[in-house]
Image (cartoon, helix red, strand yellow):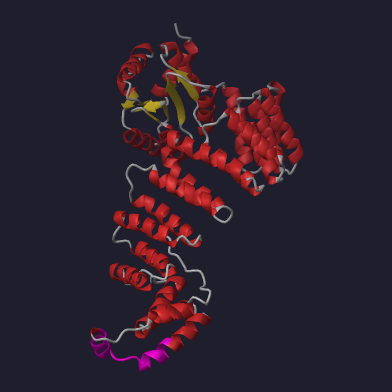
Amino acid sequence: MFGESTDTIVHDFIKKDGGVIVYLSDDFVFTRALRNIVSRVIGLSGDSLLAFSSMNAAMKKCLELQDQSIPCVIFIERMIENKPSTDFIINLKREFPDIKMVVLTWEATQETVAYFFELGVSRVLIKPASANMVIDALAEVISPTMELKQQIELCEELLEKQQYDAALEAADRILMNRPDSARALVLRGNALMGVGETDRAVQCYMAAHEAKPIFMAPLIKLAEAFKEMEDERALAYMKELDDISPLNPERKIDIAEEHLRKGEHEEAEKYLDRGITVAEKEVSSMVGDLTQRIVDAVTAIAPNLAVKYLNRVIDTKRVLGRDDLVHFNRLGIILRGEGRWAEAVEVYGKAVTIAPEDPVIHYNMGLAHWEGKQRMVALDCFDRALSIDPNFYAGSVGAALNIGLLHLELRRYRDSIPFFEHVLDLDPENSLAQVKLVEARSKAENEPDPVRKASESAGDTVFDLTMSDSKKSKKKRKPFTNLEL
């Protein structure tokens, strides 16, 4: 028999508040069982439960309910089509911050439960779940103890409005009745942080952690507090968080960044590896963003690591698409910066197979060839980019300058002039463009006209570019300007 209170809470949520239950699962047996619980035990019609086996369809329905201000609770299977549903949970919480989520799973470890709570899941329910367990979970998610809920919501609202003194009083009222409430201790710590009482706030966070070690919020706040103070304890608390909830890939990157800051590259690499591995297994949609974050963190310090992780994200993709072009482009730029222009050309070659009509790829490939002193090949790449989009360089001082300089080096004086003019349109004080434009115009006056030039090129007259190369190589070239995709 169900407790009358839990039945009533769920019944009123659906009947009086107009709420619905959304269920995302490919377990059709449990879908039928859940429908029976709703229709027979609580005495409500079947349309109170909306079941979906498609993540896209479930997401669309939840967002429709949000737009219509219809309250809902969503049950989500831990595994959908043998893949973790973590991506869906993260995206849903991002789009629908107030949604109540219950995860259903056949097995759960402390690590997975902790990570779900970090993601905003309200309850984790172990299958097979009885009708009693389902109704109790629903009731708890829909309406926790009303008085405590109202007090906590008031305190959170005051914190959001930055009314820290009032929030401190509200937190103290909760703690008078619930002195061991970890959540109230965290709220009190937040209020103290707001008024600049960092040491007292840290004490509250520590007390909250001691009161409920599995509760993540105190440790997160402790790590944040110590990180702001550049205190060594920040790393210790981040690692403690990682021990409790090791499925969070972003925290592993946080830890790696701390090790990088301390110059401990090997230790950083261990956490970077773990972060990418977890993301590949648990949150596939996050891999690209994590890789970009890693590359941002390590490029200046350890470019070899940037190359490693960009190659990894590219190699592990079964199907490469336009969304992956940013990884190819970034990898090519880093390889060129390391003097590995031939490898950069190979990377851009792969990118061209994905997007053959992208002018930026051809332009950056041209820069790589140029750095390898393959100037005619570089020119072909620039010409290809310009044939795709004659204005692709518009607005970029560096790109226009590079194209102009290559034309000038190859004695295509007239062709170089428009690019130097464009640079000066954007940056009238650009001294290099000023000098090169004067040079190009001067030499263009003595350049044979195009008809005569074409006739000469058909004969025995050739330009000695090797000599030009040897002279130029003595000068250190300024870094090329890359274009981002």
Q: Is residue 158 left or right of residue 409?
A: right
Determine which quarter of the picture holds residue 256.
top right
Q: Is residue 16 above or below residue 65?
A: above
Q: Position of residue 106 (x, y in %)?
A: 42, 18
What secondary structure is the stretch in magenta mostly built from? helix
Check the image and report above or below for 325 versus 202.
below
Going 25% across and 91% down the picture, which residue do you hit? 452
Choose between 480 and 196: the one closer to the eye: 480
Q: In the figure, residue 35 lies in which quadrant?
A: top left
From the image, which quarter does the C terminus lie in?
A: bottom left
Q: Is residue 296 left or right of residue 151?
A: left
Look at the picture and state if 424 lies above or below 197: below
- Residue 246 part of the magenta segment: no
How many circles with numbers are drawn on the protein? 0
Q: Position of residue 296 (x, y in %)?
A: 53, 52
Q: Is residue 174 visible?
A: no
Image coordinates of residue 343 in percent, x first then y, are: 41, 57
Viewer-proximal residue, 302 or 460?
460
Q: Which residues are magenta?
A: 440-457
Residue 242: image location, x then y, percent: 59, 33
**Camera-side residue: 446 or 24?**
446
Direction top: furthest residue: 1
| Residue furthest out toward the bottom | 446
Quarter of the image that includes the N terminus? top left
Q: Residue at x 49, y 85 (%)?
A: 435
Q: Is residue 448 magenta?
A: yes
